[in-house]
Image: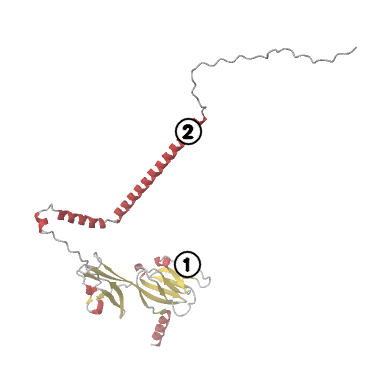
Amino acid sequence: MKIIVWLGFVLSALSAAGEVIQTRPGQSVTLDCGPSTPRGDLSWLHGNDRIFYVNSKSGFHTKGPAAVNLRSKLKSGKDLEITGVKREDAGKFTCMAGGKSVEHTLLVVSVSATSPDSFQAGSTVILQCDVNGLEKSPEVEWKRPGGNKVLKQAKVILSHVALSDDGTWECMFSHGGKLYSENLEVEVKEPATEAPRSSPTQSSKDNPKSPCLKCGNNHQSGSGFGKLSWWMWVAVGVGCLVVVLLVVFVIVLCKKIRRRKKKLQRMKNGRQSLRPNQFCQCNRPTAAGKPQQGRQKGKPSALPLQPLLKE
Protein backbone atom coordinates (compact mmCIF):
# COMPACT_ATOMS: atom_id res chain seq x y z
CA MET A 1 0.00 0.00 0.00
CA LYS A 2 2.82 2.39 0.85
CA ILE A 3 4.48 1.58 -2.49
CA ILE A 4 1.32 2.53 -4.42
CA VAL A 5 1.02 5.82 -2.56
CA TRP A 6 4.70 6.55 -3.21
CA LEU A 7 4.34 5.83 -6.96
CA GLY A 8 1.31 8.13 -7.11
CA PHE A 9 3.27 10.86 -5.40
CA VAL A 10 6.16 10.48 -7.86
CA LEU A 11 3.85 10.57 -10.91
CA SER A 12 2.09 13.66 -9.63
CA ALA A 13 5.45 15.36 -9.14
CA LEU A 14 6.63 14.47 -12.63
CA SER A 15 3.46 15.63 -14.36
CA ALA A 16 1.85 18.78 -13.03
CA ALA A 17 -1.77 19.43 -13.90
CA GLY A 18 -2.23 22.25 -16.42
CA GLU A 19 -5.18 24.54 -17.05
CA VAL A 20 -7.78 25.13 -19.72
CA ILE A 21 -7.30 28.49 -21.43
CA GLN A 22 -10.07 30.03 -23.54
CA THR A 23 -9.45 32.65 -26.22
CA ARG A 24 -10.80 33.99 -29.53
CA PRO A 25 -9.21 34.09 -33.00
CA GLY A 26 -6.83 37.01 -33.43
CA GLN A 27 -6.06 37.45 -29.73
CA SER A 28 -2.83 36.77 -27.82
CA VAL A 29 -2.34 34.18 -25.09
CA THR A 30 0.51 33.15 -22.74
CA LEU A 31 1.02 29.57 -21.54
CA ASP A 32 2.90 29.12 -18.26
CA CYS A 33 5.58 26.47 -17.87
CA GLY A 34 5.41 26.49 -14.09
CA PRO A 35 5.91 28.81 -11.15
CA SER A 36 9.67 28.22 -10.83
CA THR A 37 12.52 28.49 -13.29
CA PRO A 38 12.97 25.08 -14.91
CA ARG A 39 16.28 23.22 -14.70
CA GLY A 40 17.66 21.30 -17.61
CA ASP A 41 16.59 21.38 -21.23
CA LEU A 42 13.27 23.05 -22.10
CA SER A 43 10.80 21.87 -24.75
CA TRP A 44 7.40 23.11 -25.85
CA LEU A 45 5.12 20.77 -27.81
CA HIS A 46 1.87 21.35 -29.70
CA GLY A 47 0.32 17.90 -29.67
CA ASN A 48 3.23 15.76 -30.85
CA ASP A 49 4.97 18.54 -32.83
CA ARG A 50 7.83 20.45 -31.27
CA ILE A 51 7.60 24.25 -31.11
CA PHE A 52 10.77 25.19 -29.20
CA TYR A 53 13.77 23.42 -27.77
CA VAL A 54 16.29 25.18 -25.50
CA ASN A 55 19.58 23.60 -24.54
CA SER A 56 20.29 24.38 -20.89
CA LYS A 57 24.07 24.30 -21.30
CA SER A 58 24.53 26.35 -24.48
CA GLY A 59 21.26 28.28 -24.34
CA PHE A 60 20.77 27.60 -28.04
CA HIS A 61 17.15 27.89 -29.29
CA THR A 62 15.77 25.71 -32.06
CA LYS A 63 12.30 25.67 -33.58
CA GLY A 64 10.38 22.59 -34.56
CA PRO A 65 7.96 21.80 -37.42
CA ALA A 66 4.83 23.01 -35.63
CA ALA A 67 2.92 25.64 -37.62
CA VAL A 68 2.31 27.77 -34.54
CA ASN A 69 6.05 28.47 -34.07
CA LEU A 70 5.87 31.31 -36.63
CA ARG A 71 3.57 33.24 -34.28
CA SER A 72 5.07 32.21 -30.94
CA LYS A 73 8.06 33.20 -28.80
CA LEU A 74 9.49 32.45 -25.38
CA LYS A 75 8.67 34.86 -22.60
CA SER A 76 10.76 35.08 -19.41
CA GLY A 77 12.86 32.24 -20.77
CA LYS A 78 10.21 29.56 -20.15
CA ASP A 79 6.64 30.67 -20.94
CA LEU A 80 5.14 30.42 -24.44
CA GLU A 81 3.44 33.51 -25.90
CA ILE A 82 1.25 33.12 -29.02
CA THR A 83 0.08 36.18 -30.99
CA GLY A 84 -2.69 36.22 -33.59
CA VAL A 85 -4.26 32.97 -32.45
CA LYS A 86 -5.92 30.84 -35.15
CA ARG A 87 -8.41 28.02 -34.95
CA GLU A 88 -5.77 25.43 -35.83
CA ASP A 89 -3.74 26.52 -32.78
CA ALA A 90 -6.28 24.94 -30.43
CA GLY A 91 -5.41 21.71 -28.62
CA LYS A 92 -2.84 20.36 -26.19
CA PHE A 93 0.36 22.27 -25.31
CA THR A 94 3.04 20.57 -23.20
CA CYS A 95 6.04 22.15 -21.49
CA MET A 96 8.82 19.69 -20.57
CA ALA A 97 11.71 20.84 -18.40
CA GLY A 98 13.93 19.19 -15.80
CA GLY A 99 12.11 15.89 -15.99
CA LYS A 100 8.75 17.53 -15.33
CA SER A 101 5.93 18.40 -17.70
CA VAL A 102 3.00 20.83 -17.63
CA GLU A 103 0.10 20.32 -20.00
CA HIS A 104 -2.38 23.03 -21.03
CA THR A 105 -5.51 22.89 -23.18
CA LEU A 106 -6.12 25.87 -25.46
CA LEU A 107 -9.74 26.40 -26.50
CA VAL A 108 -10.35 28.74 -29.43
CA VAL A 109 -14.01 29.83 -29.49
CA SER A 110 -15.27 31.74 -32.52
CA VAL A 111 -18.71 33.38 -32.59
CA SER A 112 -20.25 35.16 -35.56
CA ALA A 113 -23.53 36.62 -36.81
CA THR A 114 -24.40 37.02 -40.50
CA SER A 115 -27.37 38.64 -42.18
CA PRO A 116 -28.06 39.46 -45.86
CA ASP A 117 -30.10 42.56 -44.93
CA SER A 118 -27.73 44.41 -42.56
CA PHE A 119 -29.48 43.17 -39.41
CA GLN A 120 -32.75 44.98 -40.09
CA ALA A 121 -35.87 44.00 -38.19
CA GLY A 122 -37.76 41.28 -40.02
CA SER A 123 -34.68 39.92 -41.81
CA THR A 124 -32.88 36.60 -41.30
CA VAL A 125 -29.90 36.40 -38.93
CA ILE A 126 -27.63 33.36 -38.50
CA LEU A 127 -25.67 32.89 -35.26
CA GLN A 128 -22.74 30.45 -35.21
CA CYS A 129 -20.58 29.27 -32.29
CA ASP A 130 -17.59 26.95 -32.91
CA VAL A 131 -15.42 25.44 -30.14
CA ASN A 132 -11.98 24.16 -31.21
CA GLY A 133 -9.46 22.31 -29.03
CA LEU A 134 -11.48 19.42 -27.57
CA GLU A 135 -11.39 15.84 -28.77
CA LYS A 136 -15.19 15.69 -28.62
CA SER A 137 -17.36 18.63 -29.62
CA PRO A 138 -19.26 19.91 -26.59
CA GLU A 139 -22.94 20.75 -26.46
CA VAL A 140 -23.30 24.43 -27.25
CA GLU A 141 -26.19 26.66 -26.17
CA TRP A 142 -27.15 30.21 -27.10
CA LYS A 143 -28.57 32.48 -24.44
CA ARG A 144 -30.75 35.35 -25.63
CA PRO A 145 -30.30 38.95 -24.42
CA GLY A 146 -31.70 39.28 -20.91
CA GLY A 147 -31.51 35.50 -20.30
CA ASN A 148 -35.15 34.89 -21.19
CA LYS A 149 -34.61 31.83 -23.38
CA VAL A 150 -31.85 29.34 -24.17
CA LEU A 151 -31.45 27.78 -27.63
CA LYS A 152 -29.63 24.43 -27.44
CA GLN A 153 -27.75 24.42 -30.73
CA ALA A 154 -24.47 25.77 -32.08
CA LYS A 155 -26.10 27.31 -35.17
CA VAL A 156 -29.21 29.43 -34.67
CA ILE A 157 -31.27 30.79 -37.56
CA LEU A 158 -33.55 33.71 -36.69
CA SER A 159 -35.90 33.94 -39.66
CA HIS A 160 -37.69 37.09 -38.45
CA VAL A 161 -35.36 38.98 -36.14
CA ALA A 162 -37.07 41.54 -33.90
CA LEU A 163 -35.89 44.63 -32.06
CA SER A 164 -36.02 42.58 -28.84
CA ASP A 165 -33.16 40.44 -30.21
CA ASP A 166 -30.83 43.44 -30.05
CA GLY A 167 -28.16 43.06 -27.38
CA THR A 168 -25.61 40.55 -26.07
CA TRP A 169 -25.98 36.91 -27.08
CA GLU A 170 -24.01 34.38 -25.01
CA CYS A 171 -22.54 31.13 -26.36
CA MET A 172 -22.19 28.59 -23.49
CA PHE A 173 -20.64 25.13 -23.17
CA SER A 174 -19.19 22.97 -20.39
CA HIS A 175 -15.92 21.04 -20.13
CA GLY A 176 -14.51 19.13 -17.15
CA GLY A 177 -17.38 20.23 -14.95
CA LYS A 178 -16.72 23.94 -15.66
CA LEU A 179 -18.93 26.30 -17.64
CA TYR A 180 -17.40 28.43 -20.39
CA SER A 181 -19.02 31.24 -22.38
CA GLU A 182 -18.29 33.74 -25.17
CA ASN A 183 -20.33 36.88 -25.86
CA LEU A 184 -21.50 38.29 -29.19
CA GLU A 185 -23.02 41.73 -29.72
CA VAL A 186 -25.95 41.82 -32.17
CA GLU A 187 -27.38 45.17 -33.28
CA VAL A 188 -30.82 45.08 -34.88
CA LYS A 189 -31.86 48.18 -36.83
CA GLU A 190 -35.34 49.40 -37.56
CA PRO A 191 -36.58 48.72 -41.09
CA ALA A 192 -36.11 51.57 -43.55
CA THR A 193 -39.37 53.43 -44.20
CA GLU A 194 -40.17 54.38 -47.79
CA ALA A 195 -41.67 57.79 -48.60
CA PRO A 196 -45.33 57.56 -49.70
CA ARG A 197 -45.81 58.00 -53.39
CA SER A 198 -48.11 60.80 -54.47
CA SER A 199 -51.18 59.53 -56.34
CA PRO A 200 -52.06 61.20 -59.65
CA THR A 201 -55.00 63.61 -59.70
CA GLN A 202 -58.26 62.91 -61.43
CA SER A 203 -57.41 65.26 -64.31
CA SER A 204 -54.17 63.40 -64.94
CA LYS A 205 -56.05 60.11 -65.02
CA ASP A 206 -58.51 61.49 -67.56
CA ASN A 207 -55.85 63.13 -69.70
CA PRO A 208 -52.57 61.19 -69.62
CA LYS A 209 -50.87 63.94 -71.66
CA SER A 210 -51.67 66.69 -69.17
CA PRO A 211 -48.90 69.01 -67.96
CA CYS A 212 -49.17 67.50 -64.47
CA LEU A 213 -47.78 64.21 -65.68
CA LYS A 214 -44.90 66.06 -67.33
CA CYS A 215 -44.22 67.86 -64.07
CA GLY A 216 -44.25 64.56 -62.23
CA ASN A 217 -41.84 63.07 -64.75
CA ASN A 218 -39.54 66.06 -64.38
CA HIS A 219 -39.62 65.67 -60.60
CA GLN A 220 -38.74 62.00 -60.83
CA SER A 221 -35.92 62.70 -63.24
CA GLY A 222 -34.57 65.32 -60.85
CA SER A 223 -34.66 62.86 -57.95
CA GLY A 224 -32.95 60.30 -60.16
CA PHE A 225 -30.23 62.83 -60.93
CA GLY A 226 -29.62 63.19 -57.21
CA LYS A 227 -29.05 59.43 -56.97
CA LEU A 228 -26.31 59.21 -59.59
CA SER A 229 -23.59 56.75 -58.80
CA TRP A 230 -20.07 57.89 -58.02
CA TRP A 231 -18.63 56.92 -61.41
CA MET A 232 -21.22 59.14 -63.18
CA TRP A 233 -20.16 62.07 -61.00
CA VAL A 234 -16.55 61.35 -61.89
CA ALA A 235 -17.43 61.29 -65.61
CA VAL A 236 -19.24 64.65 -65.31
CA GLY A 237 -16.27 66.19 -63.48
CA VAL A 238 -13.79 64.92 -66.07
CA GLY A 239 -15.97 66.28 -68.88
CA CYS A 240 -16.11 69.73 -67.27
CA LEU A 241 -12.34 69.70 -66.80
CA VAL A 242 -11.80 68.84 -70.47
CA VAL A 243 -14.10 71.68 -71.56
CA VAL A 244 -12.24 74.18 -69.35
CA LEU A 245 -8.86 73.05 -70.70
CA LEU A 246 -10.16 73.32 -74.28
CA VAL A 247 -11.39 76.89 -73.71
CA VAL A 248 -8.03 77.88 -72.18
CA PHE A 249 -6.19 76.33 -75.13
CA VAL A 250 -8.32 78.27 -77.64
CA ILE A 251 -7.74 81.56 -75.80
CA VAL A 252 -3.97 81.01 -75.65
CA LEU A 253 -3.89 80.06 -79.34
CA CYS A 254 -5.83 83.20 -80.35
CA LYS A 255 -3.45 85.43 -78.37
CA LYS A 256 -0.46 83.74 -79.94
CA ILE A 257 -1.86 84.31 -83.46
CA ARG A 258 -2.51 87.98 -82.69
CA ARG A 259 1.06 88.47 -81.42
CA ARG A 260 2.40 86.83 -84.55
CA LYS A 261 0.31 89.09 -86.82
CA LYS A 262 1.52 92.18 -84.95
CA LYS A 263 5.11 91.01 -85.26
CA LEU A 264 4.77 90.46 -89.01
CA GLN A 265 3.18 93.91 -89.41
CA ARG A 266 6.06 95.57 -87.56
CA MET A 267 8.60 93.76 -89.71
CA LYS A 268 6.78 94.88 -92.88
CA ASN A 269 6.69 98.49 -91.74
CA GLY A 270 10.42 98.37 -90.97
CA ARG A 271 11.27 97.14 -94.46
CA GLN A 272 9.26 99.94 -96.08
CA SER A 273 11.10 102.57 -94.03
CA LEU A 274 14.49 101.34 -95.36
CA ARG A 275 13.57 101.93 -99.05
CA PRO A 276 14.74 105.31 -100.73
CA ASN A 277 12.13 108.04 -101.17
CA GLN A 278 10.94 108.48 -104.76
CA PHE A 279 9.77 112.00 -105.61
CA CYS A 280 7.55 112.94 -108.52
CA GLN A 281 9.44 114.41 -111.53
CA CYS A 282 7.78 116.76 -114.04
CA ASN A 283 8.53 116.40 -117.76
CA ARG A 284 9.47 119.98 -118.77
CA PRO A 285 12.36 121.41 -120.75
CA THR A 286 15.30 122.37 -118.77
CA ALA A 287 16.28 126.04 -118.73
CA ALA A 288 19.26 127.09 -120.89
CA GLY A 289 22.32 127.63 -118.93
CA LYS A 290 23.72 131.13 -118.64
CA PRO A 291 26.81 131.76 -120.73
CA GLN A 292 29.83 131.66 -118.67
CA GLN A 293 31.15 135.11 -118.47
CA GLY A 294 34.81 135.05 -118.79
CA ARG A 295 37.07 137.51 -117.26
CA GLN A 296 36.93 140.70 -119.47
CA LYS A 297 40.12 142.27 -120.39
CA GLY A 298 40.00 145.79 -119.21
CA LYS A 299 42.16 148.59 -120.17
CA PRO A 300 45.54 148.63 -118.58
CA SER A 301 45.72 150.84 -115.67
CA ALA A 302 47.85 153.91 -115.99
CA LEU A 303 51.26 153.71 -114.56
CA PRO A 304 51.92 155.87 -111.69
CA LEU A 305 53.47 159.21 -112.51
CA GLN A 306 57.07 159.49 -111.64
CA PRO A 307 58.62 162.91 -110.80
CA LEU A 308 60.64 164.50 -113.46
CA LEU A 309 64.36 164.73 -113.04
CA LYS A 310 65.72 168.17 -113.15
CA GLU A 311 68.83 168.75 -115.03
Using the numbered discs, state the Cα–Cα distance from disc 2 to disc 1 in whole angstroms.
95 Å
Q: In the image shown, does 205 or 87 lie closer to the viewer?
A: 205
- The dot on residue 239 is none
Q: Position of residue 215 (x, y in %)?
A: 18, 55
Residue drawn 35% across the image and 50% down it: 241
Which residue is the extreme one toward the right? Answer: 311
Residue drawn 9% across the image and 55% down it: 206
10 Å crowding of disc 2: few (<14), some (14-19), many (20+): few
Q: In the image shown, does 223 or 249 lie closer to the viewer?
A: 249
Q: In the image shown, does 78 or 10 lie closer to the viewer?
A: 78
- Which corner quadrant of the image does residue 250 belong to? top left
Q: Position of residue 296 (x, y in %)?
A: 68, 13
Q: Earlier in the sequence, mark 2 or mark 1?
A: 1
Camera-near label (2 vs 1) is 2
- The dot on residue 269 is 2
Question: Residue under circle 1?
Answer: 62
- Which corner quadrant of the image does residue 231 belong to? bottom left
**What kind of residue is marked 2?**
Asn
